[in-house]
Image (cartoon, rainbow, N blue to C red):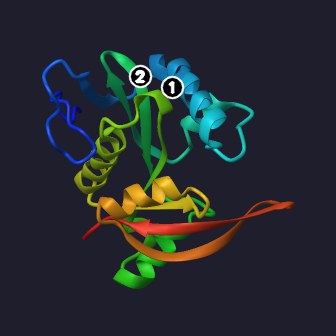
């Protein structure tokens, strides 16, 4: 699946001729090492994910994964997003089901979204989100997500894309770590 190859800036406006070409495609097994490299850049620069996983490749291939995509800028992987079924600890599906009056199983969780710091400003995060939303809709599911309350730039992206804040909850990630997350749902 591709989201197109015409470069677009963060406002959705076509970029000038000669601008880098962005393409979003399904992730495959051969991409994992490069995706982990980009994830490390993001973690070192932004602190995402909050806790670096012991096995980052496995972290990207979460057990309930429906699909995952990568973004390429001039042929180099610079971003990633996943779409999965909801699992234990996902708060957004529960909040959405209460609001929409549908089972939490009617949702898909957008996760593992990140873009290399060097590749930002090309609308890549928005492109990845659009592909994940389309993937959810193709499966008859409503996209939702949880994001750390401290990740203000990600929350700003979701708001710009029209996502609704469902609520804010505390999640226990370990016996010694509790985090606050905002839960969002895509526009209906």
The answer to whether 167 is drawn above or below residue 133 in the figure is: below
Picture quadrant where residue 91 is located: bottom right
The answer to whether residue 85 of the structure is visible from this angle is no
Label 2 CA crowd tier, 10 Å (few <14, some 14–19, many 20+): many
Q: Say which element carries label 2.
A: strand
Image quadrant containing the N terminus: top left
Q: Counting residues from the N terminus, which is met first, the one under dot 2 or under dot 1?
A: 1
Marks 2 and 1 close (CB-CB < 8 Å): yes
Q: Mark 2 points at which residue?
A: 77
Question: What x and y, as percent, mark residue 186?
Answer: 33, 64
At 42% across and 59% down in the image, what residue appears? 156
Label 1 CA crowd tier, 10 Å (few <14, some 14–19, many 20+): many
The answer to whether residue 82 of the structure is visible from this angle is yes
Question: What x and y, as percent, mark residue 4?
Answer: 17, 32
Circle number at residue 35? 1
At 54% across and 36% down in the image, what residue appears? 61
Asked whether 106 or 26 is in front, the reply is 26
Q: Say which element carries label 1.
A: helix
CA separation in Å, label 2 and label 1: 7 Å
Circle number at residue 2? none
Image quadrant containing the C terminus: bottom left
């Amino acid at each position: 699946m591709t989201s197109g190859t015409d470069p677009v800036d963060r406002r959705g406006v076509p970029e000038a001729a000669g601008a880098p070409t962005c393409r979003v495609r399904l992730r495959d097994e051969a991409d994992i090492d490069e995706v982990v490299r980009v994830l490390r850049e993001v973690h070192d620069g932004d602190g995402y994910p909050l806790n670096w996983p012991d096995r980052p490749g496995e972290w990207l291939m979460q057990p309930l994964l429906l699909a995952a995509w990568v973004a390429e800028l001039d042929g180099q992987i610079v971003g990633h997003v996943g779409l999965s079924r909801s699992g234990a600890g996902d708060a957004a599906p529960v909040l959405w089901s209460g609001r929409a009056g549908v089972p939490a199983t009617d949702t898909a969780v957008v996760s593992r979204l990140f873009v290399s710091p060097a590749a930002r400003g090309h609308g890549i995060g928005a492109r990845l989100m659009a592909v994940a939303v389309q993937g959810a809709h193709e499966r008859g599911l409503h996209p939702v997500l949880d994001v750390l309350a401290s990740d203000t730039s990600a929350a700003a992206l979701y708001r710009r894309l029209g996502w609704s804040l469902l609520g804010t909850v505390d999640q226990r990630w370990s016996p010694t770590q509790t985090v606050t997350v905002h839960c969002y749902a895509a526009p209906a």
